[in-house]
Image: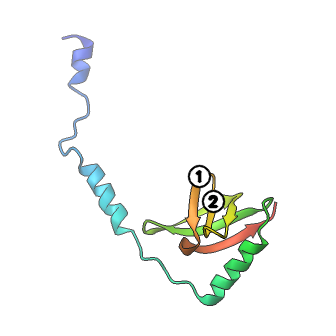
Amino acid sequence: MSKSDRAKQFAPFDALKGLHDALKMKEYEHDRMQKGDISQEKLAEMTKILFDYKKSDLLKVKYYLDGYYKEKVGKAKVDFALRTVSFDGLKITFDDIFDITIEKM
């Protein structure tokens, strides 16, 4: 038997093909959470922060997406007409923002 043929018999074998991916998906879905409510005071505070934001500052946004809270830091574009904050291709609507801060450079 050649070395390459001999090596093939020791190749990993997945008897339950796809089970690992299915378990990961179930775990992902299980960890999802409901979107929390924001008080009027917090909403007013975040609105003031958005109005005070300058393009030279870094914006730190905690937002809700697909059952999870995520965080993005960087230079952003705030569009009050469309009610969005944009980071290099990522658009976050004002309704999905949970917390926002300005980090001076």
- Judging from the image, the colouring scheme is rainbow
Along the line of sight, the residue nearer the viewer: 88 or 26: 88
Secondary element at tag 2: strand
Q: Are marks 1 and 2 in contact (CB under 8 Å)?
A: yes
The residue under the point 17% across, 42% down is 15
The amino acid type of the residue labelled 2 equals Ser
User: What is the spatial separation of the Cα atoms under label 1 and label 2, in whole angstroms?
Assistant: 7 Å
Task: Say which quadrant the N terminus sits in.
Answer: top left
Residue 31: percent from left, percent from top: 38, 68
Quarter residue 74 falls in: bottom right
29 vs 72, left or right, is left
Residue 99: percent from left, percent from top: 62, 74
The residue under the point 23% across, 50% down is 19
Residue with the mark numbered 2: 86
Up the image or down, 101 lies above or below 14; here it is: below
> Residue 89 — which label?
1
Quarter residue 104 falls in: bottom right
